[in-house]
Amino acid sequence: MLTLTRPDGTPSVDLHLTRRGAVGMFFVGYAVAALSAEAAPIMTPADGLIIEEVTIPNGAASPLPAYVARPKGKGRHATIVVVNEIFGIHEYIKDICRRLATLGYVAVAPDFFYRAGVNLPALTDFAEIRKVVAQASPEQVDGDVRATIGWIKGAAFANPGKIGITGFCWGGGVVWRAAIEDAEIKAGVAWYGQLKPVIARATELKAPVLGLYGALDQGIPQTDVEAMRAALKAAGKTGSDIHVYADAQHGFHADYRASYNEADAKDGWARMLAHFKANGVA
């Protein structure tokens, strides 16, 4: 298994990736830049689900696109905002949404990088990917999260009192910040998101966050993890916690990457669901 050397992804030269493997996987929608030729991603069928591509009014000239997966039938369901990695809305993120929808959730994955007009999953140059990501300022992303929550609250199939958020890599950082900025969010789960920007803001958390991190992550040092734990304790945020997997790298949940750790990914998924349930998002 190869090591992800960067907190928000790894250049393709660091991955065991063949041209044949990249092309084959690209046609089913995975991010080429972080793809492992040996990957066997989970493929969740859409049976019993409604899959939609919607646009969410956010005050911009062009509204915010989002991928939505939800159960068929009537009723209002707890809803999870799913925040992508730096690769945008590719098949891994869509499958996360379908996995949640098969469990009875509405899952909404906004395309936070849509303003750049770039097909991020198709890019192989990390310098170009980072340029796109850098255009999405924290203020802009926070505004898009608020717009998404507003859209969820107005949807006939969503329970407006049961909104959670989860995110991976870049999206993990968004989760911590959203739990600070948005009072409508009841719980968050951050998968290996950067901690440095939010350690000093632990006192501002409005919702409990579960952080899932890897001890072998070379981009998020354990000193940051311990600093965040200390900040949460000092702030009395007893509902928030960080779990560290001793044998996990960055991206250990991403089943299309070489960093995928099946046992830790499954355990983290179970912890995520338990955290949402314990905090009324179920």
Image: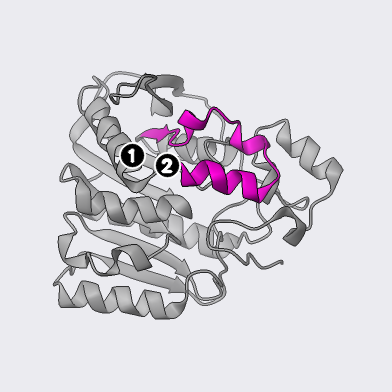
The image quadrant of residue 205 is bottom left
Q: Are marks 2 and 1 in contact (CB under 8 Å)?
A: yes
Between residue 148 and residue 49, name the one nearer to us.
148
User: Residue drawn at (30%, 63%), measured in percent from left and top?
Assistant: 198
Q: Quadrant of the N terminus?
A: bottom right
Residue 278 counted in the magenta span: no
Please state the extent of the stretch shown in magenta in the rendering.
Answer: 107-135
Residue 256 appears in the figure: no
Amino acid on which the number 1 mark rests in the picture: Gln
Circle 2 residues within 10 Å: few <14, some 14–19, many ≥20: some
Left of 151 or right of it: where is 9?
A: right
Quadrant in the picture for the C terminus: top left
| Residue designated by label 2 | 136
Name the residue located 78 percent from the left edge and 50 percent from the top edge.
37
Residue 52 coordinates in the image, percent (x, y): 45, 20
The one of 57 and 255 positioned closer to us in this rendering? 57
Where disc 2 sits, the SS reads: loop
Kindly identify which residue carries mark 1: 140
